[in-house]
Image: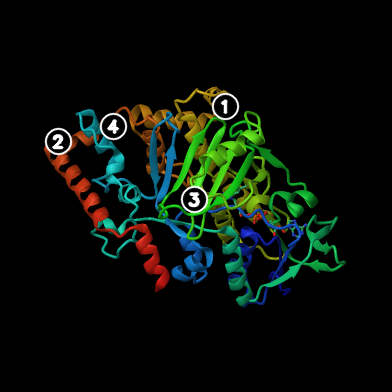
Amino acid sequence: MTDKRLKKVVIIGGGTAGWMSAALLSKFLSPNGTHVTLIESEQLGTIGVGEATIPHIQNFNTMLGIDEATFLRETKATYKLGIQFVNWGRLGESYIHPFGEYGIPMGDLQFHHFWSRMKQIGDTHSIGDYSLNIVAAKNGKFMRPIDDTTSLASRIPYAYHLDAVLYAKFLRKISEAHGAHRIEGKVVDVKVNSENALIQSVSLESGQIIEGDLFIDCSGFRGVLIEGALKAGYEDWSDLLPMDRAVTAHSKIKEPPKPYTIATAKDAGWTWRIPLQNRVGNGHVYSSRFMDANEATEVLLNGIDGEIMTDPRHLSFKTGRRKSFWTGNCVALGLSSGFLEPLESTSIHLVQEGLIRLVALMPDKDFSPANSREYNRVMGLTYERIRDFILLHYVATQRSDSEFWRYIQKLEVPEIMTHRMSLLEESGHYVSYEYDLFKLDSWIAVMEGQGRAPETYNPIADGVPVDTLRGTMSQLRHAVSEISRQMPTHQTYLKHVLQN
Ligand SMILES: Cc1cc2nc3c(=O)[nH]c(=O)nc-3n(C[C@H](O)[C@H](O)[C@H](O)COP(=O)(O)OP(=O)(O)OC[C@H]3O[C@@H](n4cnc5c(N)ncnc54)[C@H](O)[C@@H]3O)c2cc1C
């Protein structure tokens, strides 16, 4: 019997996506005798932005056996409990989209129904008062969850703000320790077998030819293999999400790092502020249809609170996704697979998601089309669900104070979005869709935060006597504020972890 196992995996690109791929694939494949080679061009460089993550990154690090303190030191990371959205619903208003759930499960009904019921009878507490992540974030507090599952303190999902360039460097060390091999060079040609449409080899500027069985395209927006050679095509989503530019700059630290990202809506987009251990990352994502680069830079610089350390850096992108992420023997990961603005910090996560799906559907040299069909189906839906959740922040707005926001008001959104929004707003019901990354509590956070809270609740919530409910809700708020009060500050906790 012929051995159909992959012998050579070749990754093009040494950005975050490339080294995440090298680390995971070398860990899983090297023991089988599969060689993992990564080709990157220092001359071309990496995109070098990407600082906020979601809690799933912890699973990725765990799979690689990464110790958290080492990771924090190597990537200059801080902790993140959620994102504060400023001026999204209306100018002057803000809310936090926390990681994790509000309240506690109460019988078979979701918590928000009980909160809505209390609201209907005049209770003015925000749903945020039932989220430890929100209350702790507002108070600049942080700690990792404790083991005691009877305590709310065991439910503190968190992520990190990190330097993606340093993360890639860190993962390079791990990949090389697992046997991955790095080649410096620029891919200038790709040889595709005309009979089976599989990539055979890539040629470098130096003349070196590298053959492979499976190719991972992590070449960033260039998509050297997936688009350059295989013409997989791109589904353009910029009509729905018109943001196509970003300008970024780093600034010096002026205050203790907040345990959350700040995303502030502007006249033609939004700005981010992300505190790391050694600096603050700032950026302005905007639509060039509604603002030029000079004005966008001014908006960014005027909003930075602290001495600016770097010249503004300009980036262009097209929102959308590759029509076929996995084509033949090539899988695109990272920016070569598509891009959604970083409003909910999902790009690095999409690399992780793609890798885990790839490992689950690992092909052999036959490259059965069934594997790639399934991968493309799942990743397509994953992208679409995230796109819709990002879109929710725009669509749920009440702003109409600039040409951009008036354009947003008139957007024709996918029907599924209108349905999900009206279901939640009009009757308080939420339905989870296949491959939703952001679920009920995230939808509630944005809808409530932007003035579109459910107008009613599931009548089954009336089954709990009102005094009992009032008591339970009060105890919950008390527990949340008491735990938060006892938590250390984010800075103190971080310092403690870094020193140990
Ligand atoms: C404005 C902005 C903000 C972002 N913020 C976040 C965020 O907060 N959170 C998040 O999760 N993500 C964020 N991202 C996304 C994040 O930066 C990327 O998803 C992540 O860094 C992965 O990038 P990459 O490795 O795909 O591409 P890149 O970093 O661009 O790397 C591409 C690599 O390919 C190599 N290469 C290209 N062509 C060739 C060639 N011909 N031969 C050899 N090598 C080649 C390059 O040298 C480089 O090594 C953001 C992106 C943008 C644009």
Asked which secondary structure carries label 4, the reply is: loop
Mark 3 surroundings: few (<14), some (14-19) or many (≥20) residues within 10 A? many
**Residue identifier under label 4:** 457
Q: Inspect this view and state whether residue 385 appears.
A: no
Which residue does the image show at 39% across and 74% down from the upper left? 500
**Image quarter hosting the N terminus:** bottom right
Location of mark 3 (residue) = 274
Residue at the far front in the pictured view: 307
Q: Position of residue 45 (x, y in %)?
A: 71, 58
Provide the secondary structure element on which disc 3 rests.
Answer: strand
Q: Tell which circle, 3 or 1, labels the residue nearer the N-terminal end.
A: 3
Q: Ligand 1: does it lie within 8 Å of the C-beta at label 4?
A: no
Kindly identify the amino acid type of the residue bearing the numbered disc 2: Val
Question: Which of the four quarters of the rendered structure image does ligand 1 lie in?
Answer: bottom right
Task: Answer whether labels 3 and 1 touch (C-beta < 8 Å).
Answer: no
The residue depicted at 29 percent of the width and 28 percent of the height is 456
Q: Nearer the viewer, mark 3 or mark 4?
A: 3
Q: Are marks 3 and 4 in contact (CB under 8 Å)?
A: no
Q: Is mark 3 within 8 Å of ligand 1?
A: yes
Instruction: Give neighbour class at mark 2: few <14, some 14-19, many 20+ (Cα, 10 Å).
Output: some
Front of the two marks 4 and 1: 1
Residue labelled with disc 2: 466
Q: Quadrant of residue 123?
A: top left
Marks 3 and 1 sit apart, C-alpha to C-alpha, by 25 Å
Name the kind of residue labelled 1 in the image: Phe
Q: Give yes or no for contact between labels 1 and 2 (Cβ–Cβ under 8 Å).
A: no
The residue at which mark 1 appears reads as 404
Looking at the image, tell me whether mark 2 or mark 3 is earlier in sequence order.
Answer: 3
Viewer-proximal residue among 211 and 265? 265
- What is the distance, in whole Å, between disc 3 and disc 4 at their CAs? 36 Å
Q: CA distance from mark 2 to mark 3?
A: 42 Å
